[in-house]
Image: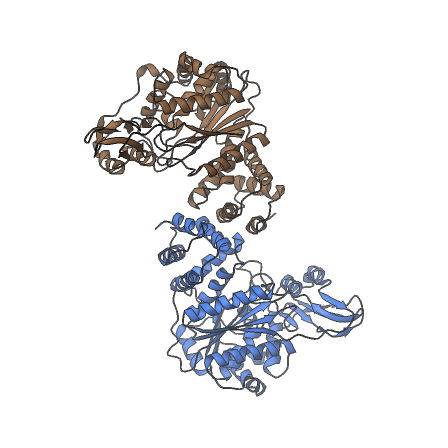
Chain colours: A blue, B brown
Amino acid sequence: MRAHDVIVTKRDGGRLTDEQIDWFISTYAGTDEIADEQAAALIMAIFLNGLEPDELTHWTGAMIDSGDRLDLSAISRPTVDKHSTGGVGDKISLIVVPLLAACGAAVPQLSGRGLGHTGGTLDKMEAIPGWRSEMSLEQMHQQLDTIGGVIAGASASLAPADRKLYALRDVTATVESIPLIASSIMSKKIAEGTRALALDVKVGSGAFMPDVASADELARTMVRLGEAHGVSTSALVTRMDGLLGATAGNALEVAEALDVLTGGGPADVVELSIALAEEMARLAGLDVDVAATLASGAAMDSFAAMVAAQGGDLSAGLPVAAHIRHVTATEPGFVHGINARRVGVAAWLLGAGRARKEDPVSPTAGVVALVRPGDEVEAGQPVLAMHADHESRFERAERELAGSVTIGAGSVEAAPMVIETVP
Amino acid sequence: MRAHDVIVTKRDGGRLTDEQIDWFISTYAGTDEIADEQAAALIMAIFLNGLEPDELTHWTGAMIDSGDRLDLSAISRPTVDKHSTGGVGDKISLIVVPLLAACGAAVPQLSGRGLGHTGGTLDKMEAIPGWRSEMSLEQMHQQLDTIGGVIAGASASLAPADRKLYALRDVTATVESIPLIASSIMSKKIAEGTRALALDVKVGSGAFMPDVASADELARTMVRLGEAHGVSTSALVTRMDGLLGATAGNALEVAEALDVLTGGGPADVVELSIALAEEMARLAGLDVDVAATLASGAAMDSFAAMVAAQGGDLSAGLPVAAHIRHVTATEPGFVHGINARRVGVAAWLLGAGRARKEDPVSPTAGVVALVRPGDEVEAGQPVLAMHADHESRFERAERELAGSVTIGAGSVEAAPMVIETVP
């Protein structure tokens, strides 16, 4: 088989054969026989000409088959996981993983680190003193069986084709393609071995998907792929018009998750966590009252057990930044919104994120919103707090945050977080 | 400027700005800042989304500006060149360059070597003992002024962006795009410094362009590009349903060109040579009788002078192959056609072409058609002759040639070579 002929097929709008897909993905992932420029040409052709539903199913299967698919069938609890398309301030995994564990499920949340202005779940957890993301497969099985929740780094052996294709898509402007996004997300999640999966597809000005129609299409595509590969899958299309919760930054988000796990926390984070956890429980076949489990403190106990099992020490407290500086309202009125992207970029400038994969991140840096949409503010009132290890970080972050809190006349009411459930 | 943003513009069907084009072409040709996979993604997006006419004009200009543009304004004769989209057995340059020189023009034919089953003009000329393709710019000027014709290797300094882009297109299945073909051909020809240019766009079963509509579009696109960059340009769309002339192979084609220059040769080669030469003479503003100049032997004298000026010795005779083997007709009837592609591949298998750029070619290997379309043949009659330096070459070539001469009932008449003239 020749890469040239595979490219021609898709370039001319045809359907790739199963053999072409298997050969291309396995050869690109496993050898140097296909040049990056050939893969780039194919991916751009897929971006522009699409993949048929059954073609995408096979493509995703080939990505899974490029590595290992974990076998969690020996776990005594029903397995279920969640995935979010991500957004600034998304600390939902830190809440729903222990919450589902407390409900009796096993949640194998294999996650990654952040790059750019959206944080990674592992970076957040690593703000907890002593916590380690690495664990053996045997440890993972044992922790899933006993505690029920694992947050760990995804092994390089899961869907290695995705790692190579994602890096390629990033530099070739082929990220924003529904079939390519769906196969990237689902190949990793299916390879993880979970039997059920709830997806959080965010839509709005703070999200990757700009409109409900695209979010709905992505959600339906991923649900179909999950079901086609034997994973009970559903998706919530959720609102992301601003910062999720009140924090962006590693330790700051852990603290907010702990607030929710102990009965407090911002209303939007609580609402989304419960909605997603209820969907996960339903998919796992668990007949439980999720909100009551959260209110009982059992989810907090599970989180503490998960952290301790991975070397973390919550009693040591979370690290705090050496310097805090406020951003104030420039006019009186009602808070209409908090721009998630700007807050994310500011948190990144303050040290919470990395520009290159090998950079370290600050556990303490970030941004805290001191007000919520709907709050009335006076001119000069502090509305955001910047946290940093060095005062030199403040200047650029402050410039990024200028105008990020929109203030207008008349109060606003929060809209429901869940726009639709798919299917 | 970032490669990513340039790719996004074209991916989303937009027009690249002049600044984006200038930056992308100059940076890709001159630095390592743009990765091959990024250029591949852009080229596939151009393949699928096209280039607007003025966008293509600027793109071609940027390719010219990636290197030198020769200044031939000091030449006393009017400059004119020709380009053909190429085909098996195309030895027309060897005839029209000296013919136009004999008519009073200066023809700076900068050419390349062949790869795969179509031969290169330099490979053909190098079958002449002693002939060298290398010459200094000063030599070239002098030869153009005195003799009027030069066939030489194109300097690496002419449109270097095309060299890099062509190699990329070859492996990424993005060769067959009219704007990309047109900019590739025209950037090199315009950089050559000629004031006028006649194009031969071949169409038919033996040509790169499969149908008249595509050939016409390519012809119009190239004519527009030439005129936009100050070169008087026209194009002939010509028939290429089978082997052009009776030979494919280096010395064999030189011998056929010498036949035409001395008043003989196959009718199709003569017809096409005169049509193209008349177009070149018209573009160069020369009021001459091209056919009479050919018949007078003046073109042959010019060819001899061109060869001698570049170290060649025609009196030494052309090299001939050590072994000749015939392919015979399998049935009686009339020759309806000779498959150009199969003859080209057979000539290549016999040693006339190269598989990799660095391979040598045999000057003597090739295929001679012993019959022409319309001829009546008997079963067992020799119809093709294979020429090779080693008998071991014959077996695969013979398999390739099986069925390449189609024989049917009733004679066929040759159609006119020129289908249309553009504009």
Vertical order, A321 against A315 (above or below): above
- Residue B200 x %, y %: 46, 29
- Residue B115 x %, y %: 38, 35
Residue at the left extreme, as displayed: B380
- Residue A248 x %, y %: 63, 69
- How many numbered marks are there? 0
Residue at the front extreme, as displayed: B410
Vertical order, A128 against B259 (above or below): below
Left or right: residue B19 versus residue B328 is right
Q: Residue at x 62, y 44 (%)?
A: B17
Q: Residue A328, can we see it?
A: no
The quarter of the picture where residue A204 lies is: bottom right
Left or right: residue B175 versus residue A176 is left
Vertical order, B338 against B139 (above or below): below
The quarter of the picture where residue A66 lies is: bottom left
The quarter of the picture where residue B170 lies is: top left
- Residue A24 x %, y %: 39, 55
In the image, B420 versus B393, the foreground residue is B420
Q: Residue A226, can we see it?
A: yes
In the image, A147 versus A270, the foreground residue is A270
